[in-house]
Image (cartoon, rainbow, N blue to C red):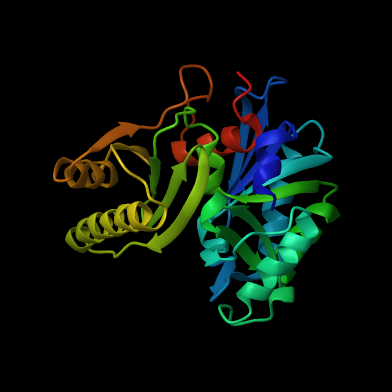
């Protein structure tokens, strides 16, 4: 993973998005501002398993089979691609690291040392990226176990596809947000999960992912509570002030969206706007949630249009 490279380095025009029940392929235009082709296939339930540091184990046969199914529908399998991963595959933590060295590798060594007491494994066993918080000394760290991600890369390599980066879906979506100086909260609501990203000055300062209760009433209360906690934490720790725009990305215009809007109506200084990508940017496609298609666009687009 390389969050900073996402903002600077042109990504491949090919991208895959993995979900709990499907694998989706997208090919972007040369300008990377629209999806030109989409293919998808179902994956068996529980094809991956989670642990305390995100992704723990992958069913090689299931993922390889899904990848082969998609590849057979393409004229030619891509040599390079990005992978949008489920948000649950990664974990995020904010640490107080003080002033980091200017050299990236030296700064990463400091971050790993700070993580020693926070992780249930050795810091050397995780793959991570980090975003310094400026003068505050706070650093947002996104991490996952290295070995399971390496297995995913091996499966794609065996199919002739080199993964340039693996990125959680909610961070891919942040590339679609307008550049504004005011604080922004992105809320991605799926059927059974809530992912939140707080951005200040265009940079993520807090990332959270929570599974949702199955009961509708409990889920609504849970979403409101987590949104309030996240916003309060960001205002206190990251000194965010003034009005906050909440960008809502949901699998549809159903209960998930309505829950966030009902929460915002009871808050002060919160404006809710629905995330969209504009007409013609993503094809109308049944069987794949809009949010998953948007993440394919976001992981490669990066705002060039």
Residue drawn at (27%, 41%), measured in percent from left and top? 257
In the image shown, does 52 or 112 lie closer to the viewer?
Answer: 112
Q: Is residue 146 above or below residue 118?
A: above
Q: Is residue 58 above or below residue 303?
A: below
Question: Which quadrant of the structure image shows residue 180?
Answer: top left
Q: Residue furthest left?
A: 266
Question: Which quadrant of the structure image shows residue 44?
Answer: bottom right
Is residue 59 visible to us here? no
In percent of width and height, residue 130 lies at 63, 56
In the image shown, does 59 or 111 lie closer to the viewer?
Answer: 111
In percent of width and height, residue 21 lies at 52, 55
In percent of width and height, residue 80 lies at 81, 40
Residue drawn at (26%, 34%), measured in percent from left and top? 271
Q: Is residue 239 left or right of residue 30?
A: left
Q: Is residue 267 above or below residue 275?
A: below
In percent of width and height, residue 148 lies at 70, 68
Q: Is residue 240 above or below residue 59?
A: above
Count of numbered circles in the view = 0
């Amino acid at each position: 993973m390389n969050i900073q490279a996402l903002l600077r380095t042109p990504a491949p025009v090919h991208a895959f998005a993995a979900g709990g029940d499907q694998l989706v392929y997208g090919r972007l235009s040369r300008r990377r501002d629209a999806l030109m082709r989409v293919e998808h296939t179902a994956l068996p339930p529980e094809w991956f398993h989670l642990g305390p540091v995100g992704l723990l184990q992958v069913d090689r046969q299931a993922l390889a089979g899904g990848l082969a199914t998609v590849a057979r529908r393409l004229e030619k399998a891509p040599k390079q691609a990005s992978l949008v991963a489920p948000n649950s595959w990664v974990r995020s933590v904010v640490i107080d690291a003080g002033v980091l060295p200017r050299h990236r590798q030296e700064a990463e060594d400091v971050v790993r040392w700070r993580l020693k007491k926070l992780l249930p494994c050795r810091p050397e066993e995780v793959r991570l990226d980090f975003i310094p918080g400026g003068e505050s000394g706070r650093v947002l760290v996104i991490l996952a176990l290295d070995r399971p991600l390496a297995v995913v890369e091996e499966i794609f390599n065996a199919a002739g596809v080199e993964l340039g980066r693996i990125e959680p879906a909610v961070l891919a979506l942040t590339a679609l947000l307008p550049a504004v100086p005011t604080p922004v909260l992105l809320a991605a609501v799926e059927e059974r999960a809530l992912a939140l990203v707080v951005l200040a000055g265009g940079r993520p300062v807090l990332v959270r992912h929570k599974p949702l209760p199955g009961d509708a009433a409990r889920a609504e209360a849970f979403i409101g509570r987590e949104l309030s906690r996240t916003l309060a934490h960001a205002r206190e720790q990251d000194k965010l002030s003034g009005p906050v725009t909440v960008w809502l990305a949901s699998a549809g215009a159903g209960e998930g969206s309505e829950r966030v809007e009902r929460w915002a109506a009871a808050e002060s200084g919160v404006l809710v706007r629905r995330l969209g990508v504009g007409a013609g940017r993503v094809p109308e496609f049944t069987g794949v949630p809009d949010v998953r298609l948007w993440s394919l666009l976001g992981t490669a687009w990066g705002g060039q249009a």
